[in-house]
Amino acid sequence: MRSALESPPSVSAASGTASVLRLVWQDVETRQFVEVGQLHELTDGAFTFAYTKGADHPRFRPLAEFPDRHAVYQSSGLPAFFGNRVMSHHRESFPQYCRWLGLSEVSTPMEILARTGGARVTDTFHVVDSFSDHDGQRRGRFFASGVRYIVGADERLRKLRPGQELVLRQDPLNPVNPLAILLDVTFEQPVGWVPDWLLTDVHAMFAVGSVKVSVAQVNVDAPTHLRLMCLLETASSR
């Protein structure tokens, strides 16, 4: 099975892809995160969705909106499954929400989904950044997880500045996930964890090259899951 950072379906290359988001599903039995599909926004404003090989997982069930694992679904607007995961711009809190995401109020739903993950408490899906790949290098943003569980994290966050590099520390004794990776200001001064959906890929990145995580934005007034936005960059050793 391929990891969460799969290559886009070949159909998109001929369709003029403007941006790509990955649909990641969590197996509740193993807690493993598997990429099961990709959403492509095309240059003409249309959208396509197709399942990837991860959708063949024996416990995964296709979405009601996309029942055929082998079809390529096309639509003129953002499919409802994804659109329902974006905060309405009519909400009073929308401008502040965009500020926490580091986006303008005229940002597209795809841009918002890439930053937020579109997670809902009622399911086990995440809509995540495709982490653009250029000449063997990957680059993308994510929000640190678990900030609320770390004593002293808020105080450390207030001292962080954009561009400041964070230290990646493996956390093999973590009771929830032995693959866990802490984000430290300095050694043993944590401010959060790399989110679980990204862990398998970060470990794979370590095996083939360098991985750098730096501070993209700090939101001390935001809910804990939006307090620390990070920038991940890799360089292949090839």
Image: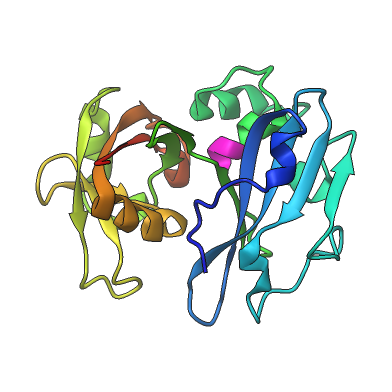
* Residue depicted at 70% across the width and 25% down the height: 108
Q: Residue furthest left?
A: 187
> Which SS does the magenta portion mostly show?
helix
Give the magenta range.
113-117
Note whether 169 is above or below 122 in the view shown. above
The quarter of the image holding the C terminus is top left
Which residue is painted at 63% across and 64% down in the image? Answer: 53
Query: Residue placed at 38% from the left, 61% from the top?
Result: 200
Q: Position of residue 86 (x, y in %)?
A: 71, 39
The image quarter in which residue 219 lies = top left
The residue depicted at 24 percent of the width and 41 percent of the height is 237
Residue 153 in the image, given as x and y percentages of width and height: 25, 45
Residue 121 magenta-highlighted: no
Of 115 and 12, nearer the camera is: 12
Compared to residue 28, the image places residue 224 above or below, namely above
Where residue 39 sits, quadrant-wise, is top right
